[in-house]
Image (cartoon, rainbow, N blue to C red):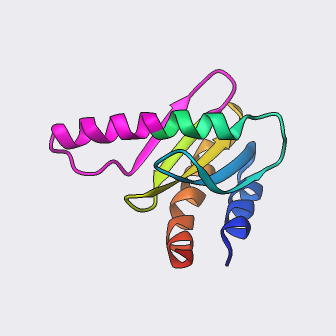
Amino acid sequence: MPFADILKDVVHGTDGAVGALVVGVDGIPVEEYALTNDLDLQSMTVEYATLLKEIEKGSQSAQLGSTKEVTVMADKALVMLRRLTDEYFMVLIIKPDGNFGKGRFLLRMSVPKLLKEF
């Protein structure tokens, strides 16, 4: 199943989700699916890739192992980042009143499907 189909399934399966992406650690999206053009996904992914790198440094220096997932709760969205490989991660963007639990579950369940596509 192509990346785009997997991302579409996650977005449509999560109440309040507005977009999902597969992103390289350099912040460049490999694939994206969005319900709206209101979000600047390119800029957002670059910034969150930088954040993920810093969090990873903290996890490693504290000897906690690799960071698997990070959630950012902002005023206008919940942004979930889930590591796929050392070089790629997935991002799911949900409205604040969306179903965070379902999004997190679908994000986790999509990882094996996405890994098959690499």
Q: Is residue 36 magenta?
A: no
Which residue appears at 61% of the width and 43% of the height? 100
Question: Residue placed at 51% from the left, 66% from the top?
Answer: 111
Q: Quadrant of residue 60?
A: top left
- Between 109 and 52, the one lying in front of the other is 52
39 lies left or right of 113: right
- Left or right: residue 103 compared with residue 70: right
- 12 lies left or right of 89: right
Point out residue 107 in the picture as x, y percentages from the top left corner: 56, 57
Q: Where residue 68 sits in the image (x, y, percent)?
A: 38, 51
Q: Is residue 67 left or right of residue 100?
A: left
Q: Is residue 29 above or below residue 79?
A: below
Residue 56's place in the image compared with 5, above or below, is above
Percent position of residue 115, x then y: 50, 72
Q: Indicate the quadrant containing the N terminus: top left, top right, bottom left or bottom right.
A: bottom right
How many dots with numbers?
A: 0
Residue 29 position in % (x across, y down): 62, 52
**Residue sticking out furthest to the top:** 75
Q: Nearer the viewer, residue 106 or 26?
A: 26
Vertical comparison of 97 with 16: above or below: above
**Residue at (68, 31) in percent of width and height:** 96
Q: Which residues are magenta?
A: 50-78
Query: For the point 73% across and 69% down, which residue is it?
Result: 5
Please say whether residue 65 is one of the residues in the magenta stretch. yes
